[in-house]
Image (cartoon, grey):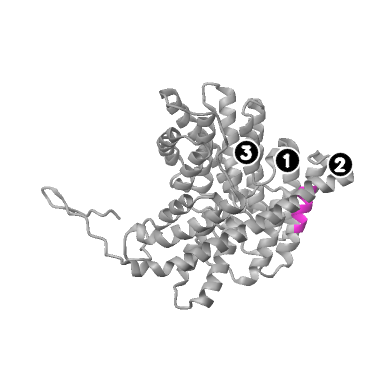
Amino acid sequence: MSAYSVAVSPDEAVVAPPTAQPAVSARTLLPLVAPALVAGVGCSLLFLAVSGAAEKLQDVLWSDLPDALGIGRYSTLWMIVMLTATGILVGIVVWKAPGHAGPDPATLGLGGEEPLPPYVLPGLVVATALMLAGGPSLGPENPIIATNVALAFWLGRKVLPRAPGALWVSLASAATIGALFGTPVAAALVVSEALAGKPMPIRGSLWDNLFGPLLAAAAGALTTTLVASPSFDLGLPHFGRPGWGDLLATIVVACAATVLGMLAVLAFPYVHGAFARLRHPMLTLPLGGLVLGLLGALGGHLTLFKGLGEVGELAADPEGWSAGQFAVMTVVKLAALLIAASCGFRGGRIFPAVFVGAAFGLCAHALVPGVHVSVGVAAGVLGMLLAITRQGWVSLFTAAVLVASPAILALMCVASLPAWLLVTGRAQMQLSKDGTSLR
């Protein structure tokens, strides 16, 4: 609700002055410091532990093992075998682990759900690590956030039983998002978007309510940065002063990427329903793995895994592939994201969507060289993320952070408006419990 209230009389509308926010003293916020710091560091370390274990397992599965067997690391045979085997292993975990590795991932968003019971978490972590190492096109964000939220909620209620449970949910969510992106800005944007239109947890300003989550996100981001030194900057060619042609290209590419992403969103409930009719994880996940292996054989090894490292390979040589090759990678990766999210693999959809958007933008540049590489990539990522995630701030932030240029941000803000008109009020790439799309 706006800070201004409008009273309409028969003659005119009178705008009342803004209502003052209730004062919040430092004594109210200071008790949040210690829990926020602990949550930030703990959530980051768990994320790094799971990611590190998955990377080591990936090296074994995709380097050491095929080398020992004398098989090409990314040969068609090995991709089909590995993705199918990953489906079998994750299927066993989902079938036999207590709590079945959590609820259907197609029904989960980027946090905000009820904390999972602790007994579910071991299966969820194992299923996530196997997925990350085995090659399905999903990222770690959703299951890692769910795990950290559940742990923080459980431990926080043990240590500080008088603290509201919502405190631990918000701190853990923000801390994990900060750790995932290596900056607290993303978490602040997500939290502020989540608070829009809802009662504030603290009776103060937005910044009062962001104090704890932002501190947790900063602690998580700094821990990740100090331990792993992540970087989202793709090192794309420098983009200087924008022109009218850049504005037009940004709008066209962003809207086209949004339309492409919405096609996958519209297909999501139907593909998910087809897998759901098989009813058992030892059928859905191995079949999904087989399909992903065939898609990987079609699109090449760059269309495997969560996609962040593979985007770096594309950006390092934007002229190294033809428009047709970029188009194939775009379609294959989007199809792989759709299959992996529908058949039951535990993972998030943001990171693979970044690959799809970047490949789409590079395809636009290859087709029309007048489209600057940085403009194409940022606009493609913006449009694809708006369609897949329906989160405007995350989409804008991710698109801008991939290209280190202040001028890009202005173009993205303009392009986000027509792209948002294409997605608002339409189905999301998230399902309700009955299998229908959320809006």
- Residue corresponding to mark 1: 296
Q: Which mark is residue 311?
A: 3
> In the rendered structure, which disc, 1 or 3, sits on the residue that comes first in sequence?
1
Q: Which mark is residue 71?
A: 2
Q: Are marks 1 and 3 in contact (CB under 8 Å)?
A: no
In the picture, which quadrant includes the N terminus? bottom left
Assess disc 1: are there few (<14), some (14-19) or many (≥20) residues with their C-alpha within 10 Å of its C-alpha.
many
> In the rendered structure, which disc, 2 or 1, sits on the residue that comes first in sequence?
2
Residue 392 image position (x, y, % from top left): 45, 46
Q: Is residue 251 left or right of residue 434?
A: left
Assess disc 2: are there few (<14), some (14-19) or many (≥20) residues with their C-alpha within 10 Å of its C-alpha.
few
Q: Residue type at mark 1? A: Gly
What is the magenta range?
A: 82-89
User: Element under label 2?
Assistant: loop
Q: Are marks 2 and 1 in contact (CB under 8 Å)?
A: no
Q: Nearer the viewer, mark 1 or mark 3?
A: 3
Q: Is residue 415 above or below residue 370?
A: below
How far apart marks 1 and 3 lie (CA) works out to: 15 Å
Determine if the magenta segment contains residue 84.
yes
Determine if the magenta segment contains residue 72.
no
Residue 315 image position (x, y, % from top left): 61, 33
Is the magenta region chiefly helix, strand or loop?
Answer: helix
Q: Residue at x 52, y 76 (%)?
A: 159
User: Element under label 1?
Assistant: helix
Q: Nearer the viewer, mark 2 or mark 1?
A: 2
Q: Quadrant of residue 407?
A: top left
How far apart marks 3 and 2 lie (CA) works out to: 25 Å
Q: Residue type at mark 3? A: Val
Q: Are marks 3 and 2 in contact (CB under 8 Å)?
A: no
Q: In this orientation, does residue 110 appear?
A: no
